[in-house]
C-alpha cells in the first residue's frame, strides 16, 4: 500500500522581497538623490528618547510609497512610524511636518520600556534648493547645524555656524513654534587599511556597510583594488605603501594586513613613530607579534610605544580563520575604539549663516498624533499607553512574562 508523501512543498510567494537599504552618510544627501528621481518622500528622525530604545536621538530613515532607506530601530515602532510617514505623503494638504510620541510598551508589542519622540517631515522637489545648498556646505565646512523650524503651518530650514549641544535639540512647543536643531555627525573617524587581500577586501566591505568610518585603502597591487569602491572608501595603489603613513590625519586608526611581513613591519614602525595615531592593529599570530615587538625595541622604540601595537587583532572568542570571520572580529574591535566626541556649545547661541528656506505648504501643524491602525496582531493607541516602567509581563516576550506565568 502506498503512503501519501507528507513532505511540505514550498509555496511560491506572490511578491519577491528585497534587501532593506541602509542609510549611508547624512540623510540630506540621500534625500537629494531620491528627489532627483521622484517627486516626494518623508523623513523620520528620532529627536528625543527616554529609557531603553532601539536607536539613538538623531537616527533617521527616509520613506516613500514603495520602500524605505535607513532605520529607526525596526519592529512595530518602525512599522507605525512608516505608516504615519506614508499618511503624511498621501495628504498633501496636511502640515508638512509633525511630531509624534510613541511608548515602547505592550501596545507596541515591545518590552523596551522607553519613549521615543519622532519628527516626521514631507519633502518634495520644492525642497531641493535648500537641500542642495546644505549638502554642498556640509561637505566643506565643519561645525554647521541644520535648523528646521515649524510655525504656522510652514517649515523653514537654515544652516547655523555653531554646533548645537548634542546630536539633536528641540526647542519650543507645537503648534506655536518648534525648531529642530540637528548637528550632522562629526567627521567620521579615519581608518587606514593597508592590504587588499581576502581579509582586507572583506573588512572594507563590512566597514563600508556600517558607514561609520572614512576609509583609506592602500595596496601595492593595483589589480586587487576594485575599480568601484563603496561610498566612504578611497583606494590608492602605490609602490611604497609605507610612505603614505605620514599623510594620515591625526587620530587615525590603522589596520595593517599586507601580503609581505617585511612591509608590515615597516608600516607598523612608521605608524608607531607617530605620536598622534588613535590605534594600530596588525594581523598575525602571537609569534609574529613577539618578533615584531622585539625588533621594534631593538630599533629604538620605547616599550610604551611598542605596547600600542595590537597583534593579534580582532575580538577574542572567534576561532574561525575564514576571511569574513576575521574581518568581523577586526570590525568589532574597531567599533570598540570608536567613541566620537560631541560638541558642547548650546543651540541657543548658534548664529544663522544662510538664508532661510521655507516650505510652501501651509496648513495647521500638530504636536502629536494618534498611532494609525496597527498591523495584524497588534493593538493601537500608543499615546494612551501608561508608563511601562513597571512592566507587568503582559506582552509575553520577556523574562518578566515568564516569571509571572510561574
Image (tube, rainbow, N blue to C red):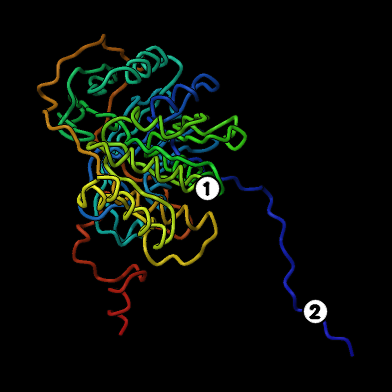
| Quarter of the figure with the C terminus | bottom left
Relative to 108, 230 lies left or right: right
Quick check: can you spot residue 381?
Answer: no
In the image, residue 130 above or below residue 88: above
Residue at position x 38%, y 33% from top?
214
Closer to the observer: label 1 or label 2? 1
Helix, strand or loop status at disc 2 = loop
> Residue sitting at 30 percent across and 30 percent down?
249
**Extreme residue in the right direction:** 1
Q: Is residue 28 left or right of residue 36?
A: left
The secondary structure type at the circle numbered 1 is helix
How crowded pointer 1 is (Cα within 10 Å; few <14, some 14-19, many 20+) is rated as some
What residue is shown with label 2? 5
Counting from the top left corner in percent of width and height, residue 91 is at 43, 28
Q: Quadrant of residue 252?
A: top left
Q: Give x and y (percent) for residue 8.
A: 72, 72
| Residue 202, disc | 1
79 lies left or right of 348: right
In this view, 257 is above or below 344:
below
**x%, y% of residue 239?**
52, 30
User: Front-most of 258 and 392?
Assistant: 258
The percent coordinates of residue 16 (x first, y second) are: 66, 48
Amino acid at each position: 500500500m502506498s503512503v501519501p508523501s507528507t513532505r511540505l512543498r514550498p509555496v511560491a510567494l506572490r511578491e519577491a522581497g528585497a534587501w532593506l537599504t541602509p542609510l549611508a552618510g547624512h540623510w540630506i544627501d540621500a534625500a537629494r538623490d531620491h528627489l532627483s528621481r521622484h517627486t516626494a518622500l518623508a523623513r523620520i528622525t528620532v529627536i528625543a528618547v527616554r529609557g531603553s530604545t532601539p536607536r539613538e536621538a538623531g537616527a533617521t530613515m527616509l520613506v516613500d510609497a514603495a520602500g524605505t532607506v535607513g532605520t529607526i530601530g525596526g519592529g512595530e515602532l518602525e512599522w507605525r512610524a512608516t505608516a504615519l510617514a506614508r499618511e503624511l505623503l498621501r495628504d498633501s494638504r496636511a502640515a508638512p511636518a509633525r511630531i509624534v510620541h510613541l511608548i515602547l510598551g505592550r501596545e507596541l508589542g515591545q518590552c523596551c520600556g522607553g519613549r521615543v519622540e519622532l519628527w516626521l517631515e514631507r519633502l518634495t522637489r520644492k525642497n531641493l534648493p535648500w537641500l542642495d545648498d546644505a549638502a554642498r556646505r556640509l561637505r566643506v565646512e565643519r561645525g554647521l547645524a541644520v535648523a528646521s523650524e515649524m510655525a504656522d503651518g510652514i517649515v523653514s530650514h537654515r544652516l547655523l555656524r555653531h554646533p548645537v549641544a548634542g546630536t539633536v535639540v528641540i526647542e519650543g512647543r507645537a503648534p506655536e513654534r518648534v525648531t529642530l536643531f540637528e548637528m550632522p555627525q562629526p567627521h567620521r573617524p579615519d581608518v587606514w587599511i593597508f592590504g587588499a587581500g581576502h581579509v582586507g577586501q572583506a573588512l572594507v566591505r563590512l566597514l563600508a556597510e556600517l558607514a561609520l568610518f572614512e576609509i583609506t585603502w592602500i595596496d601595492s597591487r593595483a589589480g586587487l583594488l576594485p575599480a568601484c569602491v563603496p561610498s566612504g572608501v578611497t583606494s590608492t595603489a602605490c609602490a611604497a605603501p609605507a610612505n603614505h603613513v605620514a599623510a594620515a590625519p591625526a587620530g587615525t586608526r590603522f589596520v595593517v594586513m599586507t601580503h609581505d611581513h617585511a612591509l608590515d613591519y615597516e608600516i607598523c614602525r612608521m605608524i608607531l613613530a607617530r605620536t598622534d595615531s588613535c590605534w594600530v592593529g596588525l594581523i598575525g599570530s602571537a609569534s609574529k607579534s613577539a618578533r615584531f615587538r622585539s625588533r621594534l625595541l631593538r630599533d629604538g622604540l620605547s616599550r610604551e610605544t611598542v605596547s600600542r601595537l595590537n597583534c593579534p587583532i580582532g575580538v577574542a572568542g572567534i576561532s574561525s580563520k575564514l576571511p569574513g570571520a576575521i574581518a568581523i572580529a577586526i570590525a568589532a574591535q574597531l567599533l570598540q575604539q570608536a567613541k566620537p566626541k560631541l560638541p558642547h556649545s548650546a543651540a541657543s547661541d548658534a548664529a544663522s549663516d544662510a538664508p532661510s528656506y521655507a516650505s510652501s505648504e501651509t496648513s495647521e501643524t500638530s504636536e502629536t498624533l494618534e498611532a494609525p491602525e496597527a498591523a495584524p496582531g497588534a493593538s493601537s493607541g500608543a499615546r494612551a499607553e501608561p508608563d511601562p516602567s513597571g512592566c507587568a509581563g503582559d506582552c509575553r516576550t520577556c523574562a518578566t512574562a515568564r516569571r509571572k506565568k510561574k
